[in-house]
Amino acid sequence: MKIFVINPGSTSTKLALYENEKQVWTGGAHHPVDDLAKFHHINEQYEYRKEFVHRMLAEAGIPIQFDAVIARGGLLKPTPGGVYAINEQMKHDLIHAQMEHACNLGALIADELAKECNCPAYIADPEVVDERMPEAKLTGIPEIQRISIFHALNSKAVSRRYAASIGKHYEDLNLIVIHLGGGISVGAHLKGKVIDVNNALNGDGPFSPERAGTVPADQLAELCFSGKYNLRQIKKMLNGGGGLAAHLGENDMITIASKAERGVEPYKKVLDAMLYTVAKEAGARYVALRGKVDAIIITGGIAHSDYCIKTLRSWIDCLGNIVLMPGEDEMGSLAYNALGALKGELSLQVYQPE
């Protein structure tokens, strides 16, 4: 079965073609900043990105003849995890999404391509997967609820792979999954459902290479009304200019981890502090699972760093069995989900948000 995968990022579009589980072609590119600067809203990039996909396929001599097209899910309304057939409600919600991100265009392009070759179009485990228990949603301010935005696709994919490696199903296990990347998410997976997780985009949890995570509320309020910053600047502090980038003026983890390992300050102090916030979040998920944890999976790009893993393990080894699954394979994960849906091994979900 031929499966075409589309993964739009903020400055790039990644493409891949799979024949069953095997990747037979990969393409894509980082889009020139000047090209993207012409667009004032993500939705305005639709034709630009769609034409790019068609051009890449034509240049590679790949006919638009697929058994399925699957895209990275966008910032939809909260929805359970799984494989979803793209429908009109989904497209409407992506076009009118409150949060802008290029991933919102993936399903729209996938649907258009699928119509060209009369095949199904899917998304799987979008970032807004919300399976949390009620207790995990409330805060001390009724007007503010915790939001579920995390690395759902990779977190669930590595969980399934780990379960298969020990001869079990994902739905049989209780797992803590720590995704270490530009954003950091720590989720409690109870028998196949993520019952608690931090908002890894701009809300709470550990700080990360470029995100602030949870900060003291009163001090944040004082900063907001100090007259020094506008709303856009404050939001940039929370997402894009916070975390390691704010403390160190850079977010390259290879450089930062290398300096921290050599004891160079303030690199060591700041990186160790970041990893400590990750460890505390893992402890909170241990509580969410009532101490019944089959494994703690550490994944994402930063999981390649020996220093980061050693430091993090010094705090969380006491919580349970640590499993390292570094990196992330979003393209392979998407293809796996599409293939499972085509074979009937994964049930197809219907997007019907409340």
Image: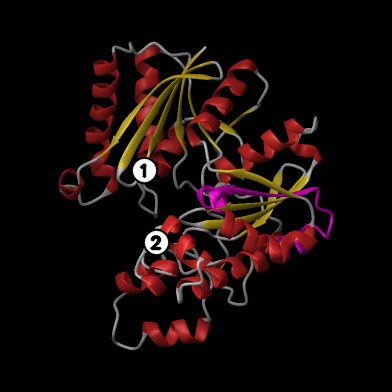
The alpha-carbon separation of the residues under discs 2 and 1 comes to 18 Å
Residue 48 appears in the figure: yes
Q: Position of residue 286 (x, y in %)?
A: 76, 60
The residue that appears at 30% across and 19% down in the rendered structure is 57
User: What amino acid is labelled 2 in the image?
Assistant: Asn
User: To which quarter of the image does residue 344 belong?
Assistant: top right
Which disc is residue 251 wearing?
Answer: 2
Q: Secondary structure at mark 2?
A: loop
Give the class, few, some or many, for how many residues have Cα within 10 Å of label 2's Cα (few <14, many ≥20).
Answer: many
Q: Which residues are magenta?
A: 283-305
Does the segment drawn in magenta span residue 71? Answer: no
Residue 81 lies, with reference to residue 271, above or below; the image says above
What residue does disc 1 label? 9
Q: Position of residue 278 (x, y in %)?
A: 61, 64
What coloring was used for the rendering? secondary structure
Q: Position of residue 302 (x, y in %)?
A: 52, 53
Quick one: 221 or 333, which is closer to the camera? 333
User: What amino acid is labelled 1 in the image?
Assistant: Gly
Residue furthest to the front? 262
The residue that appears at 51% across and 76% down in the rendered structure is 215
Residue 267 lies, with reference to residue 294, above or below; the image says below
Question: Which comes before the other along the chain, label 2 or label 1?
Answer: 1
User: To which quarter of the image does residue 242 belong?
Assistant: bottom left
Quick one: 251 or 289, which is closer to the camera? 251
Residue 135 appears in the figure: no
Q: Position of residue 121 (x, y in %)?
A: 46, 24
User: To which quarter of the image does residue 83 belong?
Assistant: top right
Give the class, few, some or many, for how many residues have Cα within 10 Å of label 1's Cα (few <14, many ≥20).
Answer: some
The residue that appears at 62% across and 77% down in the rendered structure is 140
Does the segment drawn in magenta span residue 299? Answer: yes
Q: Which circle, 2 or 1, is nearer the viewer?
A: 2
